[in-house]
Amino acid sequence: MTLDETVACIGAGHAGVQLAESLRTEGFAGRIVLIDEQEHLPYSRPPLSKEFMTGTEMAPLPLKGASWYAAHDVTLHTGTRATSIDRERRRVHLEDGSALGWNHLVLAQGARARTLDVPGSTLAGIHTLRTLNDAKGLRAPLARSNRVVVVGAGFIGLEFACAARATGLDVTVVDPAGRALARSVSSVTAAALVSRLEAAGTHFSFETSVLAFQGEDHVRRVLTSNGDLDADLVVIGIGVVPRDELAHEAGLEVDGGIVVDSALLTSDPNITAVGDLAVSSSTGARTECVQNAADQARYVAQRIVGKTAEQYAHVPRFWSHLGPNRLQIVGTWTGSDNSELAGNPDGAFSIRHYRGSSLIAVESVNQPREHMQARKALESRLSVA
Amino acid sequence: MPTITYRQPDGSTLSVAVSDGTSVMRAALENDIRGIIGECGGQAMCATCHVYVGSTPELPPIAEEEQEMLECTAAPRDPARSRLGCQLKAGSDFEAIEVEIPARQV
Ligand SMILES: Cc1cc2nc3c(=O)[nH]c(=O)nc-3n(C[C@H](O)[C@H](O)[C@H](O)COP(=O)(O)OP(=O)(O)OC[C@H]3O[C@@H](n4cnc5c(N)ncnc54)[C@H](O)[C@@H]3O)c2cc1C
Ligand code: FES
């Protein structure tokens, strides 16, 4: 596309805002429009389940200051939901009835928290945690609750459990799987983290499904396959659902997310998808982390201005913060055929994952140096490949 | 109000007044200061908020995780002056500080 055209992006989260910044850095001179249904100035999500929960800081961390958008000539439409995509006429229709034309459209709507549909799931006191409003809505209940049940031992659930435990609440985490973080870390790392959270007083109940919630208006009990639990606050952290409905309605290929090729293009060559909602046609996987959203956006900006014709290739990395336990992961550990533990699983340690003799991923707990070295090693290999 | 002065690699400077508790990283994002990314949101996990501290009163010692992250910054580390901007908080750590922004963060 030529550099004076319009790039519109639905979603002003980590990917959307990075796209706008990178387009300007790469010299794009056309119009950039970011659309987001949330009324807030775009903000960073990771702190929401961590220090924002228990800290004194009331304001979210902005992705960019308010003045940035005007200073870089980026039109930010917040508080406006995109309701449909007209591919023929290259327009996005907005909730307020207006429409916006584009030459290239980027879909960056992220994902929504998956909800649990069991009897009683609409009682008050049952929350999910994805947005700033969700996080704000949890701070007051956290201060007046006693017993918390967290459904789901993934990152959001465990991070929230740590925050709730830090304020002295009685916390139980239930999960139908046999262990924590089953999709994201190796079993050794998961076991080490769980035993530390247990030592700090959090209870775990694995192989446990939630059957129903009970209470008058407000949740009081959680009925599970493994007995009942009292609760006056419940947080559901059972994963996310990609927000691919507009793409689907517009006839784009969708399969557990918006399907993208190696250049992050959807089945329409004028439409790109990035971040949490994009599923790779070659691996069939979505990647849910800030680094992926930001790196994909940087790549797409370069592609749009014509600075790269290569395929998108990056080494994924992720971090999480569970109380004093700082987890950092680089690479993709699934597919490893041998692993090596370095350090002490009770203290600071790393697990290096290999396929054959080549290093493919490293998980580190409280070993940032190991993480950063692994990151350099894996990234340098990518650049020679 | 505490102040933070940011010096860019090209020598230009900008001072901002911030409220107590604001980190050097957060103030940079809020005030559209180029060259500080803050990808991890201030958790000493990404080292994309690396700064070189200039003329300043004594700063608190570097915690171990900050120390280790600083060993792998994109721009060279200056053992005497490198810090993570997210770990320096106005009010408790400094009243006035001048930081230099490195040429690269990733
Ligand atoms: C509480 C929490 C903690 C996390 N912690 C970490 C962490 O420690 N480390 C890490 O790497 N990752 C973490 N993540 C994941 C990370 O935040 C996501 O991977 C990242 O935000 C994905 O970016 P995105 O731009 O794809 O989507 P998002 O940041 O979710 O942005 C999507 C935006 O699109 C908007 N939108 C959706 N549909 C429409 C529509 N129809 N019209 C208008 N706007 C729309 C939404 O309002 C939203 O603002 C965390 C996520 C959460 C929720
Ligand atoms: S913001 Fe990530 S290390 Fe400071």
Image (cartoon, rainbow, N blue to C red):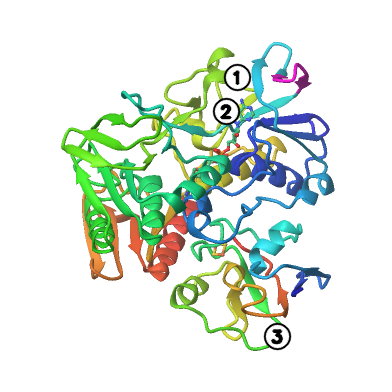
Q: Which region is colored magenta?
A: A93-101
* Amino acid type, residue under disc 3 in the picture: Thr
Residue annotated with mark 2: A265
Image position, residue A212 (x, y; %): 27, 28
Q: Are marks 1 and 2 in contact (CB under 8 Å)?
A: yes
- Tell me the quadrant of the picture where the N terminus of chain A can be found: top right
* Amino acid type, residue under disc 1 in the picture: Asp
Q: Residue furthest front?
A: A216
Residue annotated with mark 1: A268
The chain letter for the residue carrying disc 1 is: A
Residue at 69% across, 58% down: B29
Residue annotated with mark 3: B56
The chain letter for the residue carrying disc 3 is: B
* Amino acid type, residue under disc 2 in the picture: Leu
Gap in angstroms between the C-alphas marked 1 and 2: 7 Å
| A306 in the magenta segment | no
Image position, residue A285 (x, y; %): 40, 33
